[in-house]
Image: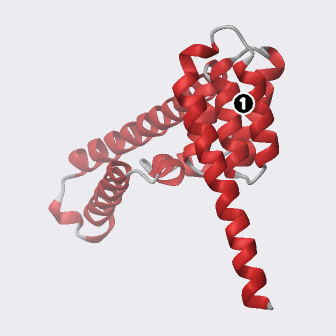
Amino acid sequence: MATQKKPWAIYVWPGLPHIWTRGSWSALGVAIIAAVLICAVMVGSFGWTELITPGVRNTLWASLVVIWCIAGLVSAVKLRHDAAKDETGKCENPFGQAVNLYLKGDYYQAERVLNNLLMENPRDLDASLMLATVLRHTGRFDEASRQLDQLICFDGAEKWELEIQQERELLSEAKYKLKDKHANGMTIAS
């Protein structure tokens, strides 16, 4: 998934970058506190000027500007750091990325990542078994069966013997359910 470029304007308000990108509740709190703070300083400066002395007023404005700038810089640095960490994590563990995609039900992307892994290393048993599972989930039973047949031929496949057997059973069940569904559909339609 490509990282979207964020509009520069979101860095102007403290907390807004993390609300925008992550939906952070703590960032919402920071944004609300910033709004209350600026409102208080503005009321003290332009509304009820007798409440705050000119020296305190200038100090509050200077503090507000400094805090505002620091908050914007911290947000920008943190977002770039988080984005870099996310990209690094994706690049370092493509199998983990495939597992996450599979668990989210994004079988197409999971299959794409697994096929890339198998192009790099055709003997990757973990990726091969997971690809068979993804193929079963997408209803491509013959391809899944061929993937399992190919997997069992590799050295080291014995460590996955139980999982391969379970996958074959799940594949048989899925084929049976599909046949049964078609048979029931034809009798109902007749």
Q: How many marks?
A: 1
- In the rendered structure, the answer to whether residue 153 lies left or right of residue 161 reads right
* Frontmost residue, 69 versus 121: 121
Q: Height in image: 122 above or below 67? A: above
Who's the residue at 35% across and 41% down the image? 62
Number of other residues with Cα within 10 Å of mark 1, as a class: few under 14, some 14 to 19, many 20 or more = many
Q: Secondary structure at mark 1?
A: helix
Is residue 155 shown left or right of residue 25? right
Residue shown at the point (59%, 46%) measured from the top left = 170
Q: Report whether 38 appears left or right of 82.
A: left
- The residue tagged 1 is 148
Can you name the residue that lies furthest to the bottom here? 190
Which x, y percent locates residue 123?
74, 14
The N terminus sits in image quarter: top right
Amino acid type shown at disc 1: Leu
How far across and down, in percent of the image, does residue 91 sit?
66, 22
Percent of width and height locating residue 72: 48, 39
The C terminus is located in which quarter? Answer: bottom right
Let me know if residue 71 appears in the view: yes
- In the picture, measured across the screen, residue 44 lies left or right of residue 135, that is left
* Residue furthest out toward the top: 155
Residue 2 can be seen in this image: no
Nearer to the camera, 179 or 138:
179
